[in-house]
Image (spheres, rainbow, N blue to C red):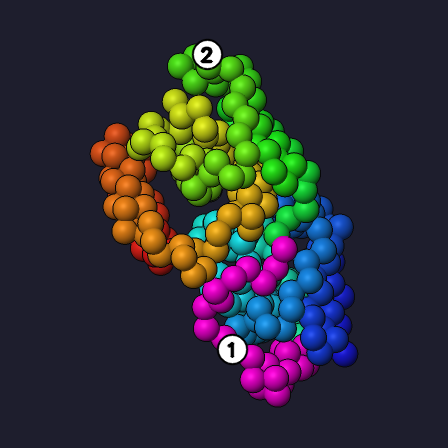
């Protein structure tokens, strides 16, 4: 049994599960507070590390690729304050953090845990129902149906069609990108058989994000949806891989040409898509 308690949160390891509870300190990110407790089975862990610092250290849990739907849909784009697998450690708790690392690493070796990519989700994803309002709309998901509603910031070309509602079985994929600098972000739902989508600003199946406080919460919606879709590595998912890959790359290219994605964002998004296929 290993446990470390900090303002930033509490991590506990019982030999089978790393239990992560976010702290109540005002510095704890909204996404982590909203997500709440996360129980990570040892089989989902790829590694753990502690990085000491003069003012504070960092305890980090690294999950296997494809094990967590939240990490899958965010593709490394979560801001550090929203990362549930990072814990800020005060200097006087360095020894406790190092002991925690030793215990997890010893268990990984003892159990001979496979650290390669997972072929199915090993975490359940955020709880449902979940509703988030941010950017130019609100998304509600009850585990089966997704509903999108618009607000005064929505372009008329998008809002004129009214609210949108569809079922999880209608979806091909979901994606989330944060706002970066002057570039807006989005959450987008791609329906099966749908043509290339317009920019999120005009897409009736997307919510455009402007970089405000609640934006990261849309990543929780995306993760809750993604965990109910076929895993990218699941048997049978490869049948449509080629066409889906070409379609996604074409969509990203159009967004880049339209100026929606910067060169850096386009490259990162393209790499994320290629990793999924």
Question: Which residue shows up at 74% across the image and 63% down it?
Answer: 10
Question: Would residue 185 be seen by someone viewing this image from the given angle?
Answer: no
- For the N terminus, give its image quadrant: bottom right
For image coordinates 50% across by 75% down, the residue present is: 115
Q: CA distance from mark 1 to mark 2?
A: 50 Å
At a point 67% along the width and 42% down the height, the residue shown is 128
Q: Earlier in the sequence, mark 1 or mark 2?
A: 1
Residues rendered magenta in the picture? 98-124
Figure check: 197 above or below 105: above
| Viewer-proximal residue among 195 and 51 | 195
Residue 247: tell me if it is visible.
Answer: yes
Which residue in the rendered view is the most extreme toward the bottom?
Answer: 110
Q: In the rendering, at what x and y percent does residue 121 appear?
A: 55, 60
Q: Which residue is mark 2?
A: 160
Q: Is residue 195 magenta?
A: no
User: Which is more toward the observer, 164 or 72?
Assistant: 164
**Residue pointed to by mark 1:** 114
Between residues 124 and 11, which one lies in front from this camera angle?
Answer: 124
**Mark 1 secondary-structure assignment:** loop
Tell me which residue sits at (48%, 55%) in the image: 231
* Residue 212 spot, x, y in % from top left: 54, 33
In this picture, residue 123 sits left or right of residue 153? right
């Amino acid at each position: 049994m290993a446990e470390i308690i900090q303002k930033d949160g509490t991590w506990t390891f019982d030999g089978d599960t790393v239990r992560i509870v976010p702290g109540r300190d005002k510095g704890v990110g909204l996404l982590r507070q909203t997500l709440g407790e996360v129980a990570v089975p040892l089989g989902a862990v790829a590694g753990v590390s502690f990085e000491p610092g003069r003012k504070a250290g960092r305890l980090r849990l690294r999950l296997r690729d494809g094990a967590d739907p939240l990490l899958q849909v965010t593709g490394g784009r979560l801001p550090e304050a929203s990362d549930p697998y990072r814990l800020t450690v005060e200097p006087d708790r360095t020894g406790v953090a190092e002991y925690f690392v030793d215990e997890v690493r010893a268990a990984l070796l003892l159990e001979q845990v496979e650290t390669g990519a997972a072929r199915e989700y090993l975490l359940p994803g955020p709880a449902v129902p979940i509703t988030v309002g941010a950017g130019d709309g609100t998304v509600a998901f009850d585990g089966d149906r997704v509903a999108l509603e618009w607000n005064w910031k929505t372009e008329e070309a998008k809002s004129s069609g009214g609210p949108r509602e569809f079922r999880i079985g209608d979806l091909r994929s979901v994606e989330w990108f944060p706002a970066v600098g002057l570039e807006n972000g989005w959450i987008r739902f791609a329906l099966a058989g749908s043509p290339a989508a317009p920019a999120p600003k005009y897409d009736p199946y997307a919510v455009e994000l402007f970089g405000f406080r609640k934006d990261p919460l849309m990543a929780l919606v995306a993760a809750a949806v993604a965990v109910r879709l076929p895993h990218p590595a699941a048997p049978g998912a490869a049948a449509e891989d080629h066409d889906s890959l070409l379609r996604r790359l074409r969509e990203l290219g159009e967004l880049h040409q339209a100026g929606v994605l910067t060169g850096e964002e386009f490259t990162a998004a393209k790499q994320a898509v290629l990793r999924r296929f």
